[in-house]
Amino acid sequence: MFSVVALIGLWWLAADVLVNKTFFANPTDTLRGFRDLWESGDLAADVQASGLRIVKGYSISMAVGITLGVAIGSFRSAEALWESPIGFLRYIPATALTPLFLVAFGIDDAPKVALIVAGTVFFNVVMIADVARAVPREMVDTAYTLGAGRVRVLGRVIMPHCWPGIIDVGRINLAAAWPLLVVAELFAGTDGLGYRVTVLKRYSEWDQMFAVLLVFALIGLVSDLFLRWLRNRVSPWARP
């Protein structure tokens, strides 16, 4: 509680003393801007638009990440086939692909979803592969010794052990999905939180722009708390 109060105090100090007030809203102005955005209906519509894009793009990213990551971390054949190409592709900056996605998919939701996938999927794969590699080899060997096949070992030994780490990977990399979405909405958007920031900056509505930034922070906090709860719910034995 003290840390939250201290953060708000520093924000207030920065807004009223240290920074040009013309370009920096204090907490009171931000709350007023939040109220104005909410009453206009723009905020709810933008949260819904951006939220749906995040859900679509990051769900695809996690589905691919779990499939390839667990395979790479568990089976040498998959590791030999996929690890090097993915290690190469993950160093290509996804934001540089934005113009290509716009040309290929148009200006609707498709390029925005594609950018989220491209910017997060390779990191999800690599990190989930490391989670799968951390499964104790003794457990896997024991299952094989007792006559279990690959599919049963994957379902009964590897995946239960991996779920806490997979959820943590998803929680960590979700933070990268939102900036990618903002970039896509800045390039070509007619709604969404990133688009709203651009419009508010154009008309110098700094109080409302800070309100949108606060919404980003709140969405991130809620997402993080939910994924922590899900990890503890799915795997109570792994609770720190």
Image (cartoon, rainbow, N blue to C red):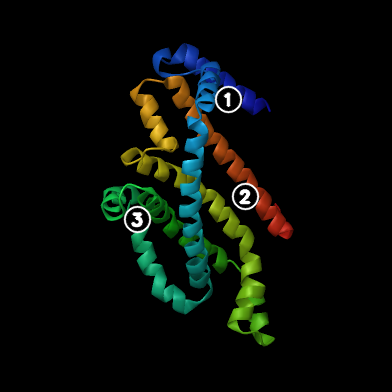
Q: Which mark is residue 192?
A: none
Q: Few, some or many C-alpha atoms within 10 Å of disc 3 (few <14, some 14-19, many ≥20)?
A: few
Alpha carbons under labels 2 and 1: distance apart: 24 Å
Task: Determine whether the residue tagged by mark 3 lies in a helix, strand or loop.
Answer: loop
Q: Which of marks 3 and 1 is nearer the N terminus?
A: 1
Mark 1, residues whose alpha carbon is within 10 Å: few (<14), some, or many (≥20)? few
Taking 39 as reference, is 204 left or right? Answer: left
Q: Name the residue under label 3.
A: 91
Quick one: label 2, few (<14), some, or many (20+) residues within 10 Å?
some
Mark 3 vs 1: CB contact within 8 A: no
Residue 184 visible in rendering: yes
Classify residue 27 by image quadrant: top right
- For the residue marked with disc 3, what is the amino acid? Tyr
- Residue 60 x %, y %: 47, 59
Which structural element holds mark 1?
helix
Give the label, 3 or 2, closer to the camera.
2
The residue lying at 35 percent from left, 21 percent from top is: 203
Dot 2 amino acid type: Leu
Q: What residue type is labelled 1?
A: Leu
Please state which of residues 213 and 89 is positioned toward the viewer in this rendering: 213
Q: Are marks 3 and 2 in contact (CB under 8 Å)?
A: no
